[in-house]
Amino acid sequence: MMNGEQPGEGTAEDVTTAFDSPTADEAEAMVSETLGAPETVEIVAAVDASESDEASDESNASSEEEAAAEPVAEATEPSPTIDAEIPTPPSEPETAGDSSGSDVEQPVDEVPVSVGAVLAADAIAASAPAPEPEVPAEPDTPVVVATELTWGFIDTEGRVHQKTTERFRGRVIGKIHGGSGEPQIAEFESNFGPLVKEVELLEKDVSEAKNKVAVLGRVRKMKTTAGRSEALGDFDDLFARLLTLETTVQTEIDERRAAKEALITRAEEMKDSTDWKVTGEAYKALFLEWKEVGASGREADDALWARFIAARESFNTRRSEHFNQRQEQWEENRLLKQDLIVRAHELSTSDQWRQTSDALRSLFDEWKKIGSAGRQSDEELWQQFRGAQQHFYDRRAATWEDGRKLKEALCQRAEDLRESTDWEATVEEMKGMMAEWKTVGTTGKRDVDDALWNRFRAAQNAFFDKRYAEASAREQEERSKLQRKDEITTSIEALAYSSDPVAAAEEAAVLRAEFDTLPPLRKDKDEALQRRIRKAMGDIRVNAAAEGARRAVSWQGKLREALERSQDQIESLQQTVVNQESTLADVRSQLASASADDTAALEQQVQELNESISYNKAEIDRLQGSMSEIQGSVEV
């Protein structure tokens, strides 16, 4: 309706083109905003003008109730745990009794979660405050440190304490039962590795994810998990990294909420417009902008979305007063059912089998209460709603069967590797299998899950027990290799203080070559020695370079002295040649008037003078050539 038209004068075209309710694209947007992944939901909106459709509402609802999905037996949902050697699959909240008395947990894997479901769960947790890790009460009496550890200490009662830092308050995580406690400390330290890997994965997800809000719940959950973990490590750095991640995501949440507030303001400014068609298109454009903003946390998004919808619905309500009351009711029912269809499609991809089954049954109860949307619309909408439900139940059955097959395959692979002696490759393979096991999910039957898990862990434990025995023997050999390498390292470090740096550099190179020929040590020890050698070699090279520069300066001075001496010699020889040539001229003058007796003596003197002059000139040429060579080596 144009601004000059009166309410009630709009055409039927105004009704069908204005923004009455979410279209197929809008419904898809609502799904992607909630789940973080697009999902097409076809919404068929057909309005039957026949009055006879009202009579069919009650019979349609009855047929839908009869066709509702029958409840399917649920499998117990497991929760994750951590194993000593490598992370184990999660154990059930309610574990079955074990007659053998074994202290190994009887876990059932958590079912695999789709990307959409994870993002939906994280979006719900994004606006919730991060839970604080549980901190045990301080002891009544002061704790006396018996043994200092890198990341904690052992008190006089054998209790292992984590180190308290600026960002982390340590706690007691275990107690040493006899011996030095080295295996228990090593186990606590090894428990820190999976935490670091999880934080690295979160950092990667935050840096790569377009929708960083969806990761916030995982970051906060990781803070709680790390705070309660029985591990020794650099928790101060770990929590600093988690805080950085949380701040990054929170910044994006604030920006998105501000953008949605701006859209709400624009939506509220238009709600009193009487230009139905133009304003309806404007609301569609706003909705597209809303989709582009993305999620900012379920609770906040619900409130913002409610305000945005309130502005739009205020406009729609005023517009709908121009049209038939029955059409309004049918349209309302159609929108409600489309909303249920969207929610059903959102749930149809979930891997949380028990919760999703309950949610789908609740949706069906709501469906029955809505009423008719017209004969044609009712059938089309019901098929869409029922299809979404059936898709979920079919997926669940197939996933449970696939889970059983995958776990049996993993058991067989673990049994094939239990006798392997390729330690490094097999350890990685075992870790990979454990990680894969955790992603498989339940088979839907507790007894089957328990049997498969016991078989899988038995094969892995057999391999790791064999590996441990071999490692003990290798440790003894390692100690002897370490002694020689340490001696070489100490010798190289001593050469850094040698009075002859140039000779020291040559000797250090020989020692380093010998070091490199020795068999490698354990990685951490080898790297420590390598760091000491690199530092010492660097000092030696600096000293040698300084000595070389000093010697070069001395050599340049000697070359300049040689040039000066050569120049003096040349000048002296040139003066001698001049004197000899003058004497030669005098002798030749005397020879012209000499008697026969004097001629022989004068001729002998001429010959000697000529030979001496030639020799001196040759010597001058030699000295000048030598000076040219020296001048090429003298630095300006």
Image: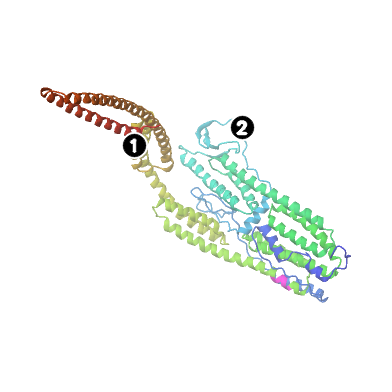
- Picture quarter with the C terminus: top left
Q: Quadrant of residue 492?
A: top left
Identified at 65% across, 43% down, the residue is 132
Tell me which amino acid carries mark 1.
Leu
Q: Is residue 90 left or right of residue 301?
A: left
What amino acid does circle 2 point to? Answer: Asp
Q: Secondary structure at mark 1?
A: helix
**Is residue 181 placed above or below 104 in the rendered structure?**
above
Q: Main secondary structure of the magenta part?
A: helix
Q: Is residue 92 above or below residue 69?
A: above
Label number found at residue 53: none
Quarter assignment of residue 615? top left
Please provide percent x and percent y for residue 475: 38, 42
Q: Which mark is residue 140?
A: 2
C-alpha span from label 2 to label 1:
57 Å
x, y percentage for residue 245? 61, 46
Q: Considering only vertical position in the picture, is 606 above or below 419?
A: above
Say left or right for 257 vs 420.
right
Question: Residue sitting at 81 percent across and 73 percent down?
Answer: 54
Q: Which residue is mark 1?
A: 511
Magenta residues (range):
379-383
